[in-house]
Image (spheres, rainbow, N blue to C red):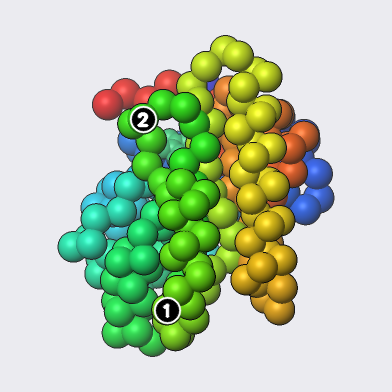
């Protein structure tokens, strides 16, 4: 695996307004340092304990993005340092993040995770659930979280037309809630979509943040 060459290849395809989250979950610190030495600073992890160990050991200018499924009792471990939480899919989680962020005197950037895939196993709000949550306006009093956009995962399928439609639906939904709830919030601007096998389609459909792991670091060994 030539991590630096893989990284450069992915970066060379990115428009200027799109950021890469290098998904380093299950890969060792040495692999992260190889990407770091090539200039990568944003890394994505899906387990809080693993991310925290890496945060403690590695350079402090790394921005750690949490992309996994959130558990309330783990939020406190990452609240002091996490740069962005991608997978918020309930008001309760948002309120829990707010509480832990307040203790650290921070405002943590968060993305609303939408369920866009056909598979039932994926987490996330339905569009209707998310809109209903935003309509309550309770979130507006959460001063220690910053809603900055949406995140979604397409179906794991070879049907690229379906994947394209799913990404398109997320982009359309983003524009709708941006207009309805975040018209005065310039920071609400992220559409986190696209993984190793589908990020070229996500880029065509307006992604601002791709989350790429195996294409950079190789297959994960669990
Ligand atoms: C693991 C993971 C990725 C990266 O997947 P690859 O196929 O290795 O690029 C992206 N997003 C989420 C939410 C993940 O859990």
Residue 166 relative to residue 71: left or right: right
Q: Residue at x 52, y 42 (%)?
A: 152
Percent of width and height locating residue 20: 63, 46
Percent of width and height locating residue 112: 49, 57
Q: Residue at x 25, y 69 (%)?
A: 76
Residue 106: mark: none
Residue 17 relative to residue 22: left or right: right
Neighbor class of circle 1 (other Cα within 10 Å; few <14, some 14-19, many 20+) is few
| Residue that badge 1 annotates | 138
| Picture layout, residue 85 above or below residue 163 | below
In the image shown, does 85 or 96 lie closer to the viewer?
96
Percent of width and height locating residue 182: 65, 71
In the image shown, does 160 or 213 lie closer to the viewer?
160
**What secondary structure is marked by label 1?**
helix
**Upstream in the sequence, badge 1 or badge 2?**
2
Q: Residue furthest top?
A: 158
| Residue that badge 2 annotates | 120
| Picture layout, residue 35 above or below residue 86 | above
Q: Residue at x 77, y 34 (%)?
A: 204
């Amino acid at each position: 695996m030539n991590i630096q060459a893989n990284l450069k290849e992915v970066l060379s395809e990115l428009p200027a307004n799109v950021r890469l989250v290098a998904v380093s979950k299950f890969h060792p610190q040495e692999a992260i340092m190889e990407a770091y030495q090539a200039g990568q600073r944003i890394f994505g992890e899906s387990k809080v304990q693993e991310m925290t160990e890496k945060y403690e050991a590695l350079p402090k200018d790394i921005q750690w993005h949490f992309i996994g499924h959130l558990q309330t009792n783990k939020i406190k471990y990452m609240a002091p340092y996490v740069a962005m939480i991608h997978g918020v899919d309930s008001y309760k989680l948002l309120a829990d993040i707010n509480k832990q962020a307040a203790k650290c005197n921070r405002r943590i950037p968060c993305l609303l995770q939408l369920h866009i895939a056909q598979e039932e196993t994926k987490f996330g709000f339905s569009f209707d659930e998310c809109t209903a949550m935003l309509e309550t306006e309770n979130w507006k009093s959460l001063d220690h979280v910053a809603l900055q956009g949406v995140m979604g995962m397409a179906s794991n399928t070879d049907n690229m037309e379906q994947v394209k439609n799913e990404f398109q639906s997320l982009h359309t939904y983003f524009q709708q809630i941006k207009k309805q709830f975040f018209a005065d919030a310039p920071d609400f601007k992220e559409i986190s979509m696209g993984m190793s096998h589908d990020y070229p389609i996500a880029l065509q459909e307006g992604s601002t943040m791709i989350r790429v792991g195996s294409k950079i670091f190789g297959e994960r060994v669990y």
